[in-house]
């Protein structure tokens, strides 16, 4: 491996060794079974493009000083990552005992003013917790607030409609993203960086 810097050469050897090991394991009747999270449905490209254009218009209102935008979402963090793959004998389904640990859930809002507002819970995020977070967020903003969020059940539950109505009476507006459009919610990028 002359002409290759030493760290890069080490990576090349490691990659080759990993491939060789995988081939040897497979030769003994084992395979790597992975469970990646995949969406069976695909997003509607027209709705996605419309949402992108709508958000661009909202950003123009932010730049004109008319509104404040809040990209809002929840994320969960656990000290033990979920089991995603394991080596298994061909023809068998693998079973891995999942190690469970207490999970910290975070509700966050990334504001167009540059502020980041967070709260953490050592329990599941329920609709009332989310409503309380939005009420507290509303008190921190002096301009009309537009909240961009996904269609998670805690955001759209019919039992919470009176709470949503109250937030709207106080001047909060909601923009619900179309399904499978997480990259339009800027806080999702933050969660991704924190987790991976």
Image: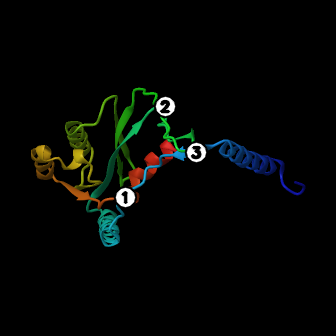
Residue at 39 percent across and 26 percent down: it is 102
Nearer to us of marks 2 and 3 is: 3
Of residue 192 and residue 82, the one placed in the foreground of this image is 82
Q: Which mark is residue 80?
A: 2
Using the image, determine if residue 146 lies above or below residue 84: below
- Marks 2/3: CA distance? 21 Å
Q: What's the distance in space between the residues labelled 1 and 3, CA to CA? A: 22 Å
Mark 1 element type: loop
Cα–Cα span, label 2 and label 1: 27 Å
- Where is residue 127? Give x, y as percent: 21, 40
Q: Nearer the viewer, residue 84 or 144?
A: 84
The mark lying in front, picked from 2 and 1, is: 1
Q: Residues within 10 Å of mark 2 (few under 14, many from 20)?
A: few
Q: Looking at the picture, how far across and down is residue 75, in whole percent?
A: 38, 42
Seen at 31% across and 67% down, the residue is: 51
The residue wearing badge 3 is 32
Sequence-wise, the earlier of marks 1 and 3 is 3
Other residues around mark 3 within 10 Å, as few (<14) / some (14–19) / many (≥20): some
Q: Earlier in the sequence, mark 2 or mark 3?
A: 3
For marks 2 and 1, the one nearer the N-term is: 1
Q: Is residue 83 left or right of residue 115?
A: right
Q: Check whether the beta carbons of the residues at disc 2 and disc 3 lie within 8 A of each other.
A: no
Residue to which mark 1 is pinned:
40
The residue most toward the right is 2
Residue 159, image quadrant: top left
On-image quarter of the N terminus: bottom right
Horizontal arrangement in the rendering, residue 19 relative to residue 127 (left or right):
right
**Could you say where residue 101 lies in the image, as x and y percent from the top left?**
43, 26
Kindly indicate the quadrant of the structure image that contains residue 62: bottom left
- Residue 24 picture location, percent across and down: 71, 44
Count residues near mark 1 (Cα–Cα under 10 Å), then give few for <14, some for 14-19, many for 20+: few
């Amino acid at each position: 491996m002359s002409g290759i810097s030493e760290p890069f050469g080490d990576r090349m050897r490691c990659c080759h060794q990993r491939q060789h090991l995988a081939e040897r394991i497979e030769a003994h009747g084992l395979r790597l079974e992975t469970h990646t999270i995949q969406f069976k449905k695909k997003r509607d490209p027209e709705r996605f493009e419309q949402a992108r254009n709508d958000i661009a218009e909202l950003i123009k209102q932010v730049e004109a000083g008319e509104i404040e935008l809040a990209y809002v979402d929840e994320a969960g963090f656990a000290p033990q990552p979920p089991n995603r793959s394991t080596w298994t004998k061909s023809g068998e389904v693998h079973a891995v005992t999942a190690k469970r640990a207490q999970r910290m859930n975070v509700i966050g809002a990334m504001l167009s003013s540059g502020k980041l507002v967070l709260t953490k819970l050592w329990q599941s995020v329920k609709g009332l917790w989310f409503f309380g977070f939005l009420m507290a967020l509303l008190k921190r903003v002096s301009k009309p607030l537009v909240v961009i969020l996904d269609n998670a059940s805690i955001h759209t539950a019919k039992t919470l409609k009176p709470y949503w109505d109250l937030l709207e009476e106080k001047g909060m507006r909601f923009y619900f993203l179309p399904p499978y459009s997480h990259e339009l919610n800027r806080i999702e990028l933050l969660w991704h960086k924190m987790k991976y």
